[in-house]
């Protein structure tokens, strides 16, 4: 592991890391969303090693990362106008586009699918590494399959130590949740995974509606060819996680009373309970002697998103029997948070009105 300045990355370090990529090695690096585990997208053997290192099922395709808009034509074909509209406004940044794949990218990257997911990250380390490697970099999140995505280099070490060549430690990532994924091969475009850029923002850029299937809300699983990642268990801590949803979160007094009721019911049965709560309600549970992890304010969902994966990792270290997590309004970034929480809870959800 090498420390690297996230804003002004050291040239020698980037060149060293790029050499590893060029030799077919694996490098974990920070992006503005989460840490990625990168390999040369043109190198089949290197790409296969990513799946091995993560224990990732071979039918779950990887995102290809580029550092210049001109490279889009190298990895995708027949990119529609909409792709350039999004690129112009939101790249570099945390939006991934699903397009028709170019022949030059090996099938291992896309798990044999005819479509490819392309992302142009804004993080200076990610961009710098791709630039010096002079090849597109295939990179999933740098966690073991099923675990929460890594937002620090320590998380990468927890999951992948000894399995990869290098970790570039650029500190905590900015958004803390993975990129928004939009499929532009369908009509209308389809949200495959909500992320840091709200769907509403992308609709505004495109001037048309984007369809939001149930699986993008974390409510169901998609067919493999449509959104391969959704069928797999994801983000889940070892500790059972129960998500308490409400139809709306306007009356937080009432809502938190319901959450408290559920927590106390389990505590009275001898369960060691911990609550993942918003800043607005956390104190209420703590006052009753319950353990609380505060995720952040309901008025700043970026904060909640940023703390989410670290909190899910911490649950297991605290040795409790049940974690209860509060829900958030499904608007803007709230959709992103609810997608991750519904998956993390493996659908152990209760609805309080
Ligand atoms: O922010 C991010 O997107 C991070 C950083 C490292 O860039 N990457 C990331 O990759 O989250 P990963 O592999 O953990 O998640 C990518 C998701 C998976 O659910 C995968 O199924 C989906 O994107 N995906 C990849 N290629 C696809 C394709 N051709 N069609 C549909 N979905 C695809
Ligand atoms: Mg992942």
Image (spheres, helix red, strand yellow):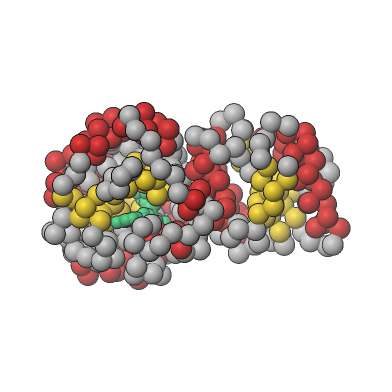
Query: On the rendered structure, is 73 left or right of 31?
Result: left
Query: On the rendered structure, is 305 left or right of 251?
Result: left
Above or below for 228 versus 285: below
**Position in image of residue 28 (x %, y %):** 34, 55
| Front residue (pair 271, 73) | 73
| Front residue (pair 80, 123) | 80
From the image, which quarter does the N terminus lie in?
A: bottom left
**Position in image of residue 94 (x %, y %):** 36, 40
Above or below for 103 versus 4: below
- The picture quadrant where one finds residue 257 is top right
Q: Is residue 285 visible?
A: no
Q: Is residue 156 visible?
A: yes
Q: Residue furthest right?
A: 268
- The picture quadrant where one finds residue 284 is top right
Above or below for 165 versus 132: below
Residue at 38% across, 61% down? 228
From the image, which quarter does the C terminus lie in?
A: top right
Rendered-image quarter of ligand 1: bottom left
| Front residue (pair 299, 169) | 299
**Position in image of residue 159 (x %, y %):** 46, 63
Query: On the rendered structure, is 153 left or right of 78?
Result: right
Residue at 52% across, 41% down? 335
**Position in image of residue 62 (x %, y %):** 31, 58
Residue at 59% across, 29% down? 299
Residue at 83% across, 52% down? 264
Q: Residue furthest front?
A: 187
Q: How many marks?
A: 0
| Front residue (pair 11, 334) | 334
Query: On the rendered structure, is 322 left or right of 54?
Result: right
């Amino acid at each position: 592991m090498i420390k690297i300045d996230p804003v002004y990355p050291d040239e020698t370090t980037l060149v060293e890391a790029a050499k590893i990529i060029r030799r077919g090695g694996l490098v974990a690096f920070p992006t503005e969303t989460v840490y990625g585990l990168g390999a040369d997208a043109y190198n089949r053997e290197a790409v296969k090693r990513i799946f091995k290192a993560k224990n990732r099922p071979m039918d779950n395709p990887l995102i290809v990362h580029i550092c210049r808009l001109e490279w889009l034509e190298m990895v995708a074909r027949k990119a529609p106008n909409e792709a350039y509209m999004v690129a112009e406004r939101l790249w570099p940044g945390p939006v991934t586009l699903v397009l028709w794949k170019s022949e030059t990218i090996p099938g291992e990257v896309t798990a044999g699918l005819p479509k490819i997911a392309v992302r142009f990250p804004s993080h200076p380390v990610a961009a710098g590494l791709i630039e010096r490697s002079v090849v597109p970099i295939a990179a999933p999140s740098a966690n073991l399959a099923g675990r929460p995505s890594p937002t620090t280099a320590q998380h990468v070490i927890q999951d992948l130590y000894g399995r990869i060549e290098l970790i570039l430690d650029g500190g905590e990532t900015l958004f803390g949740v993975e990129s928004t994924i939009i499929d532009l091969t369908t009509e209308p475009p389809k949200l495959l995974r909500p992320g840091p850029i709200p769907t509403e923002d992308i609709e505004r850029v495109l001037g048309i509606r984007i369809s939001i299937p149930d699986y993008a809300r974390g409510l169901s699983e998609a067919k493999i060819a449509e959104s391969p990642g959704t069928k797999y268990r994801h983000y889940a801590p070892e500790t059972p996680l129960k998500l308490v949803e409400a139809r709306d979160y306007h009356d937080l007094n009432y809502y938190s009373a319901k959450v408290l009721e559920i927590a106390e019911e389990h505590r009275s049965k001898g369960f060691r309970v911990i609550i993942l709560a918003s800043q607005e309600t956390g104190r209420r549970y703590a006052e009753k002697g319950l353990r609380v992890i505060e995720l952040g304010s309901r008025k700043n969902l970026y904060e909640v998103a940023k703390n989410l994966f670290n909190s899910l990792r911490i649950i297991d270290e605290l040795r409790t029997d049940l974690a209860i997590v509060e829900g958030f309004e499904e608007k803007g970034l709230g959709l992103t948070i609810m997608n991750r929480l519904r998956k993390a809870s493996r659908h152990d959800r209760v609805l309080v009105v």
